[in-house]
Image (cartoon, rainbow, N blue to C red):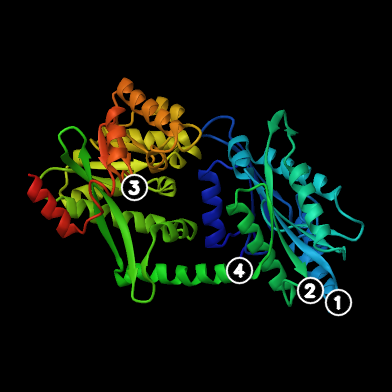
Amino acid sequence: MKSGVLSSGAATRLTSAMQEKRKRHLFETLDGKSILMSADWSAGDHAVIEFCDVSFAVETALSRQLDVLTGLANRSALMTRLNEFVVPGSRGAVIYIDLDRFKFVNDTLGHPVGDALLKLVAERISRLLGPHDLLARVGGDEFVILQSSEEQPLAAETLARKLIDIVGRTYLVHGHTVQIGASVGIALIGVDGENVTELVKNADLALFKAKTGGRATYRFFTDAMDRESQGRRAMEIDLRRAMVMKEFSLVYQPQFEIEGSRLVGFEALIRWSTPDRGHVSPAAFIPLAEEIGMIGQLGEWVLRTACAEAASWQAPLSVSVNLSPLQFKNPKLVDTIVSALSNAGLPASRLDLEITEGALMDDTDTVVAMLEEIKKLGMKVSLDDFGTGYSSLSYLQKFPFDKIKIGQSFVRSLESSPDSVAIVRAVTALGKSLGIMTIAEGVETENQLRQIAEEGCGQVQGYLTGKPLSPADAATLIKSQH
């Protein structure tokens, strides 16, 4: 092996770093040298690139079990200290910290700002620790504290509150004002695990619960979290198997024009049924599919199946298909949509793609460019759950949607909440002024239908006008209507 030669994996990661225009990338050669690539992209698509041998610095850090960036203990040092500390009768806590919104800062302001921010966070947290506590950086924006206090759980709770407060205060980094937050998970030594591995795992589970519970908060580990984690793992295995076993199917919920009660299309909805679990709610398995990276494969199956089944309908009605925000991470998404239409023989004008605000939040310009390409090809694009987020109006300025879907949370509270009535009225008026069709989903009562009609909403979808139908029943409805 020659000096400086890269493994295929290292070469692939280096190529990816160049394509993503990263300013720094650390990689290792086959002879064990650590090389830091530094790139100046100020010239646009061309860069001035320097490669520096940092083997000595990396080896020194590793030998001392220190994190290269912050100088804190690394994961190896943490585990060594935990194994020394966790003995029968010892009391303390493992406190897992994850930074909220750090990725956004890193992606928008660049890695130098992100690195500087991590150093400031490390300094702030360090000031809160007792003389015998240990702080380690164990991942990109993840930290773990070994708290040695015996006054548990009070000491851990007190520290968690202080962490959330001090990490959440404003930072000034390289001339930028930055705001992030912290989510915290806690496992108590001597209570929440028989060994070090279990303690760290359980603190991580508690952290996950804190993040899903709204972020900028803390959670103590409970046995219920472990059971939930095991249940999620079992569902993940079943979900991966479901595609092979062809356990997924689509149902179609009718959409009607309110004036004249004319059937105008269907929304394709995925269903999963297994011999062991029975019918599994999409609310349970769709987030899991997104989390484990399966949503792209699942979303493509829904798209291709919906196009193929809609092509067999006796009338040229539209079919609506939901796209996950994560599907827009795939640069070949538009090609996949075009391929689905082509293989099915379905005209582009009959496909309506529904997106939520989440698709636009992370990389608005890229997503808008993809949506504009989709529109040019003749497809329609709808904004789902309008009004439930924070930036709905700004997105309407950025992209000419064909349809706005009024969220069912507003529709269901029409009869009890004057605020919901005002929101529905405002959305329908906004749609009319912009020339955008409005459709209310989740309509379940005659009174709700009457109210949305009075407010000027154009279309309706819900259990009152039609429950989700099997492909055969949808075909029968189309035949009876046309």
Q: Residues within 10 Å of mark 2 (few under 14, many from 20)?
A: some
Helix, strand or loop at disc 2? loop
Nearer the viewer's eye, disc 1 or disc 4? Answer: 4
Lower sequence index among marks 3 and 4: 4
Q: Which mark is residue 444?
A: none
- The mark found on residue 190 in the picture is 2
Residues at marks 2 and 1 touching, judged by CB atoms closer than 8 Å: yes
User: What is the C-alpha distance between the residues marked 3 and 1?
Assistant: 54 Å
- Look at mark 1 in the image and give the residue it sits on: 89
N-term mark: 2 or 4: 2
Mark 1 and mark 4 lie on one chain; the one further toward the N terminus is 1
Residue at 59% of width from left, 43% of height from top?
22
Q: Earlier in the sequence, mark 3 or mark 1?
A: 1
Separation of residues labelled 2 and 1 (CA atoms): 7 Å
Relative to 264, is 129 above or below? below
Q: Residue at x 54, y 45 (%)?
A: 18
Query: Disc 4 residue type?
Result: Ala
Q: Nearer the viewer, residue 223 or 86?
A: 223
Whether tag 2 and tag 4 are in contact, CB under 8 A, the answer is: no
Q: Which mark is residue 322?
A: 3
